Image: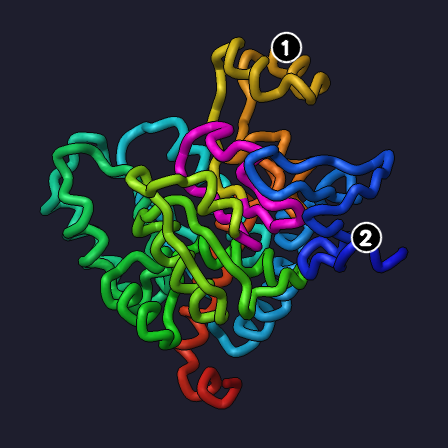
């Protein structure tokens, strides 16, 4: 490759042309006209396969669980599912299934939808003192009459495998060991295991929720990335995103991040999982993906991320939806539960291991 073609992108491994280059290539894809002219010599992004990484971590966890069981410690997760929300039921079922796969003990508590805050607090307190329970998962959302913050704050921080307790969020801010919110932790595992450079990278996090956006930004900062958090009030959002080497999209809007917002070669972590049922919206977002559009027409719905599917032709690396971040969230919940069991029931061994 001649020097005229520019440099090798550190994230995608692709050659990038200089902004004013006149090089032509059959597989070149132009960036949007709003930024300096450049060409990506790769036709599509490298997929960051969450299913593959999940399987790797599951194998590691199985070994760790067997070692714990040999020491008479069987990690256990207690899930609290209030009411009969179909989506929540599906999520909790998948988490219980993961426990079974790894050999973890699991318990499912299902209070009725009219449960009071006090009744739910009593259940959480009972789980806090149950020696066999290492992790407590309170499935969100909770009914309107329940004070969700009081419930989450009542969970013993040591058993807070969702990483949402203020104590654990405080530990994350100060970069101290503790449970970390599962989705951001899963995103970091994807970046690390696919060897996406973090140190010195410009990272943009779209979304500022306590569950994803804020902890994601902190984790990236602790990895020595330069982090910008964007939200609904951010000025000139597309231009901010275009400067990023790493984009984490967690806005909850299908196809919100447009392809021309993405810098060629950037790594894109798409946290969104949006069920699209409108035919016009599906046709607009999937116009370049006829097979997926045909499946939509057959099924009547499709899962899409927060990033427009056409970004596949611009990014250097990208998580698919589904099959990217989603599997990693449950994986990190399992990892947090196993870690909690080791730290709580074998503290001396955990210290020695560190």
Q: Is residue 294 above or below residue 225?
A: above
Q: Residues within 10 Å of mark 1 (few under 14, many from 20)?
A: few
Can you see residue 114?
yes
* Nearer to us in this view, 272 or 177: 272
Callout in the foreground (1, 2): 2
Query: Is residue 104 something one can see in this rendering?
Result: no
Residue displayed at 71% across by 53% down: 12
Q: Residue at x 15, y 52 (%)?
A: 150
Q: Which residue is mark 1?
A: 298
Q: Residue furthest right?
A: 1
Q: In the displayed structure, would residue 301 be above or below residue 305? A: above
Residue drawn 82% across the image and 43% down it: 23
Which contiguous range is marked in magenta?
A: 244-269
Circle 2 residue: 5
- Mark number displayed over residue 215: none
Task: Residue 182: give x, y in percent of width and height.
Answer: 44, 55
Determine whether, in the image, residue 160 is placed left or right of residue 22. left
């Amino acid at each position: 490759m001649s020097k005229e073609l520019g440099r090798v992108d550190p994230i995608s491994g692709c050659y990038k042309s200089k902004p004013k280059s006149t090089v032509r290539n059959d597989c070149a894809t132009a960036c949007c006209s709003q930024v300096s002219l450049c060409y990506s010599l790769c036709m599509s992004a490298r997929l960051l396969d969450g299913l593959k990484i999940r399987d790797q971590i599951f194998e590691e966890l199985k070994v760790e669980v067997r070692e714990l069981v040999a020491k008479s410690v069987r990690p256990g997760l207690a899930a609290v599912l209030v009411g009969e929300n179909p989506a929540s039921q599906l999520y909790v079922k998948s988490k219980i299934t993961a426990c079974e796969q790894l050999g973890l003990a699991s318990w499912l508590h299902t209070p009725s939808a009219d449960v009071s805050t006090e009744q739910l607090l009593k259940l959480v307190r009972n789980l806090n003192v149950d020696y066999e329970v290492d992790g407590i998962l309170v499935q969100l959302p909770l009914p309107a009459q329940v004070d969700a913050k009081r419930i989450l704050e009542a969970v013993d921080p040591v058993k807070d495998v969702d990483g949402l307790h203020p104590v654990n969020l405080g530990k994350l801010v100060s970069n101290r060991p503790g449970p970390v919110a599962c989705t951001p932790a899963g995103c970091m595992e994807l970046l690390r295991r696919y060897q996406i450079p973090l140190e010195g990278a410009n990272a943009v996090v779209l979304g500022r929720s306590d569950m994803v956006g804020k902890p994601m930004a902190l984790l990236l900062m602790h990895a020595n990335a330069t982090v910008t958090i964007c939200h609904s009030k951010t000025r000139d959002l597309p231009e901010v995103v275009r400067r990023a080497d790493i984009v984490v999209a967690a806005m909850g809007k299908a196809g919100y991040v447009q392809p021309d917002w993405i810098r060629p070669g950037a790594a894109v972590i798409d946290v969104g999982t949006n069920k699209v049922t409108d035919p016009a919206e599906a046709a607009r977002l999937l116009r370049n993906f006829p097979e997926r559009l045909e499946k939509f027409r057959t099924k009547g719905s499709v899962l899409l991320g927060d990033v427009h599917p056409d970004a596949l032709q611009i990014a250097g690396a990208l998580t698919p939806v589904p099959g990217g971040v989603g599997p990693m969230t449950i994986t990190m919940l399992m990892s947090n539960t196993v870690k909690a069991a080791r730290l709580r029931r074998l503290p001396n061994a955990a210290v020695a291991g560190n």
